Image: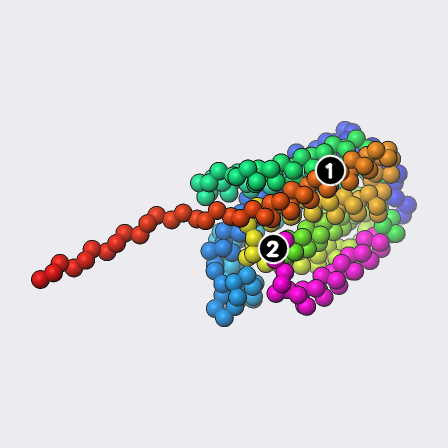
């Protein structure tokens, strides 16, 4: 079936995708915080180094209500994200997830009774400002496009190369990978999840859902599972602010790149819009790098009471 022609993005019901994406961003932040707290309290599994995520440790997390609650919130966030993609182009709604970074920073400060430092606030400002500028530039020129077989084959081919590269890197250097690498890898994979979700949804409404669309659905599930595995490893090595920053900045940058270069959602954008895309994206990435250098504040615990000494006889 021939895909439909592109239409200007933010007209009529297309605006509905923005508040839906905002709600999903809030749930993403809260779900990540809950999962991070559960992983942090779990501690290293016996016989394993702190920071490794084995099968036994994952089974223990599955019995923790806090971790399950966080997983449920993340699942709801994904559903809201998929719904927003039904109404709006990928390059408009995907970057809105950066709101989760603000929620995470404020919630973490409240949970630890520590005010965010100047470095953290600067990093958050760079992330949110960069992504906000990106959304503004995209909203002015984005268009919804039909999805062809060529689009699907191109995305699947690139995803296959990315998965093979990450699998090889994990097998060779996983013990050297830090939170930034695990978070970055997860962000890349979830960017493909969003792009594949957009294509599958578009094909459904085009009435052109066949074996190639099913292959995209399988690729979406595989990328989501691999991304979730990397996120859990990132939790054992970094702060929740860093994990959320990576997911809400790298994820949309990858998804938007796919939307622009493969799907053609910005084909009608003027040249200056692409300059704005590059500058805004670089600003957001700089915020993630800065946030990665922020050390978490040590948890303050009430002093333990000394047990009374026995009276001498």
Q: Which of 273 and 156 is in front in this view?
A: 273
Q: Quadrant where the C terminus lies?
A: bottom left
Magenta stretch, residue numbers: 152-180
56 sits to left or right of 250: left
The answer to which image quadrant residue 235 occupies is bottom right
Question: Can the viewer see residue 93?
Answer: no
User: Which mark is drawn over residue 188?
Assistant: none
Q: Counting other residues with Cα less than 10 Å from the Cα at mark 1, is it few (<14), some (14-19), or many (20 or more)? A: many
Q: Counting other residues with Cα less than 10 Å from the Cα at mark 2, is it few (<14), some (14-19), or many (20 or more)? A: many
x and y percent of residue 62 in the render?
52, 59
x and y percent of residue 218 in the render?
74, 58
Q: How far apart are marks 1 and 2 (CA)?
A: 24 Å
x and y percent of residue 11 in the render?
78, 29
Q: Which residue shows up at 56% across the image and 63% down it?
A: 52
Q: Is residue 177 above or below residue 91?
A: below
Question: Which residue in the protein does label 2 denote?
Answer: 179
Q: Which residue shows up at 68% across the image and 41% down it?
A: 284
Magenta segment includes 89 = no
């Amino acid at each position: 079936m021939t895909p439909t022609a592109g239409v200007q993005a933010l007209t009529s019901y297309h605006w509905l995708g923005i508040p839906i994406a905002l709600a999903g961003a809030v749930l993403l932040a809260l779900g990540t915080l809950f999962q991070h707290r559960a992983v942090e309290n779990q501690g290293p599994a016996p016989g394993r180094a702190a920071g490794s995520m084995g099968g036994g440790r994952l089974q223990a997390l599955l019995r923790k209500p806090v971790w399950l609650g966080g997983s449920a919130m993340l699942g709801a966030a994904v559903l809201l994200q998929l719904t927003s993609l039904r109404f709006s182009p990928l390059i408009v709604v995907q970057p809105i997830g950066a709101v989760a970074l603000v929620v995470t920073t404020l919630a973490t400060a409240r949970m630890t009774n520590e005010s965010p430092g100047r470095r953290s606030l600067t990093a958050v400002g760079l992330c949110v400002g960069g992504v906000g500028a990106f959304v503004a530039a995209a909203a002015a020129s984005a268009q919804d496009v039909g999805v062809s077989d060529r689009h699907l084959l191109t995305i699947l081919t690139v995803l296959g190369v990315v998965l093979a590269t990450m699998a090889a890197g994990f097998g060779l250097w996983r013990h050297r990978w830090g939170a930034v690498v695990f978070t970055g890898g997860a962000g890349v994979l979830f960017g493909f999840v969003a792009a594949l979700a957009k294509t599958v949804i578009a094909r459904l409404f085009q009435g052109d859902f066949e074996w190639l669309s099913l292959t995209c659905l399988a690729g979406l599930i595989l990328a989501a599972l691999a991304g979730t595995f990397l996120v859990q490893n990132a939790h054992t090595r970094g702060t929740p602010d860093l994990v959320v920053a990576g997911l809400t900045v790298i994820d949309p940058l990858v998804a938007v790149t796919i939307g622009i270069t493969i799907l053609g959602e910005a084909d009608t954008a003027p040249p200056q819009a692409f300059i704005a895309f590059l500058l805004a994206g670089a600003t957001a990435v700089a915020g993630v790098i800065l946030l990665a250098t922020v050390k978490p504040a040590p948890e303050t615990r009430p002093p333990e009471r000394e047990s009374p000494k026995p009276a001498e006889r």
